[in-house]
Amino acid sequence: MDWSPIRIRWNSIYRKLLVTYVALTALGTSILAIYILWSFYGYFMKSRQADLDAWSAALGESIADALEEKDLDRAKLTVQRYGARESVTLRLFGADGHLLSTSAPEIDRQVSDWYAVAGVKEALQNKFTHGVAKGILSNDDRLFVAKPIVRNGQMLGVLRMSITLDQFQRQFRSVIFTILGTLVFTVLLCAVISERLARNMARPIKAMSSFALQIGQGHLDGNLSIHQDDEIGQLATELNRMSQRLASLEKERRAFLANVSHELRTPVSNVLVTVEALANGAIEEPELRDRFLHTAQDEISRLSRLIQDLLDLGRLEAGVTLLEEQPLRLQDLIDRAVRAVESRMRSQSVGIDVEIPSVQLYGDPERLLQAFLNILDNAIKHSIPNSTVFIVGKIESGQIGVQIRDQGPGISQSDLPHIFEQFYTVDRSRQGSGTGLGLAIARRIVEAHGGSIVASSKGEGKGAIFTIHLPIDKLL
Ligand SMILES: Nc1ncnc2c1ncn2[C@@H]1O[C@H](COP(=O)(O)OP(=O)(O)OP(=O)(O)O)[C@@H](O)[C@H]1O
Ligand SMILES: [Mg+2]
């Protein structure tokens, strides 16, 4: 399998994985950054506001003392002392709303309407207010507190205090840039890692997809070498297995075709030669004529048997044959099979010994008979004169096992695994033997009935044993 360069198409799995990974990291890190910035801003504002509130409360108390004592100068001094240019501004209003004192006189000279300044009106109505507002005459954001100064239920004035947020906002901006920079860096780093990840994930998928394509085009000799301990690895293993199985099926198909044509050609050419010989004069000689006609008859019946077998096998294989299933007694079935081969056995001096328990099966009697006959036929064919064929049935956990044992030469260990294959015969010259379809057909029939069939042999000269297992319908 060619591994190294994989061409990445734009609508490929690689691209989808990459886009998903990068989008997810970008989204995740952005949400995190926004949350951090937002809570940082909120926390800072809250703590500054609390400082300012506490501060104004303390100053408010000392100004209240001064005002109560009608010591306006002390109150003004406090206002001016605690004010700082630009950053902290303090203003003191009288209860009637006019400005008593300010720490920023240059600015305040330009203000005509103090009611428009955030918080002043509310404070004069004895309402404490704080928050963020634009600076007076300037555009910077400032945190302010407007606090009514009340003693013994009497409104003495209003203290308004504000601090600039300029410095904080500058710092906050630099924090934003730092975080943005980190964000971009993180996303880029993730993109690089994701690229590798996506490539690594896409590579085996791509390899499998082209492998499947190759299989589809009939190239079954390839092999995927993907060794991963996950679903992709499993899929690759399955694909390899599938391609091997297809390759072996393909091989079987070719062998089958070759066998079929070979098997058909032999009897046909035999008949042809015989008929030619008859036409060329043999018909004139009675003895030759009879012999040749006999040969032709034999070959034609062999041909017809072969064609019937092939048809049966083809139908069974394709699952076209519908079984005409019905309850049937196993003993009746075996009796019919034995009766069918009785005369042949007698002529070959082969005895038979049957011992079958009384059980009922559910199946197609004609098909099952065919399966038993195929095996019995082999047993008789391979029996030596004056030997016996044993048919013994045993009930084993819901199944009946029928053993058909002969005393012939048996089957060698090297042939045993193959005898159920189509056209497999031990005697390759096929002298006197069949075409090698009998057992293949028997196995298909038994398997179609939910049973199984196995062969064993105790060694050369010790006979062969075929055991058919079938599900029992009922004990009788
Ligand atoms: N009882 C047995 N003893 C020894 N060899 C056997 C026995 N049964 C089957 N075999 C071997 O298994 C091979 C396959 O059997 P199978 O019945 O499929 O084919 P066949 O008998 O040669 O031909 P067919 O049954 O199609 O006329 C046989 O050729 C034979 O060599
Ligand atoms: Mg046979």
Image (cartoon, helix red, strand yellow):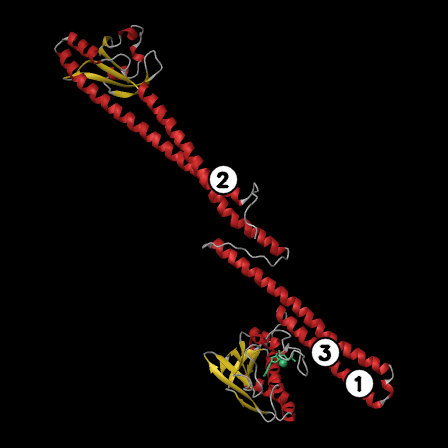
In the rendered image, the residue lying farthest to the left is 69
Q: Which disc is residue 304 wearing?
A: 3
- Which residue is drawn at the image coordinates 64% and 73% (left, top)? 313
Quick check: 218 left or right of 393? right
Labels 2 & 3 near each other (Cβ < 8 A): no
Query: Which mark is in front, 1 or 3?
Result: 1
- Ligand 1 located in image quadrant: bottom right
Mark 3 residue crowding within 10 angstroms, few (<14) / some (14–19) / many (20+): some
Residue 50 in the image, given as x and y percentages of width and height: 24, 24
**In-front residue for pair 80/12:** 12
- Which residue is drawn at the image coordinates 18% and 9% (left, top)? 77
* 3D distance between C-alphas at marks 2 and 3: 67 Å
- Which residue is drawn at the image coordinates 54% and 61% (left, top)? 241
Quick check: 323 left or right of 26? right
Placement of 213 over or under 127, stated as above or below? below
Mark 1 residue crowding within 10 angstroms, few (<14) / some (14–19) / many (20+): many
Q: Amino acid at mark 2?
A: Val
Residue that numbered label 2 is attached to: 19
Whichever of callouts 2 and 1 sits on the residue coming sooner in the sequence is 2
Residue that numbered label 1 is attached to: 292
Residue 223 in the image, given as x and y percentages of width and height: 56, 57
Viewer can see residue 64: yes
Q: Quadrant of residue 54?
A: top left
Q: Amino acid at mark 1?
A: Phe
Determine if the C-beta at disc 1 is less than 8 A from ligand 1.
no
Q: Amino acid at mark 3?
A: Ser
Disc 1 element: helix
**In-front residue for pair 123/441:** 441
Whichever of callouts 1 and 3 sits on the residue coming sooner in the sequence is 1
* 3D distance between C-alphas at marks 1 and 3: 18 Å
Quick check: 101 left or right of 307? left
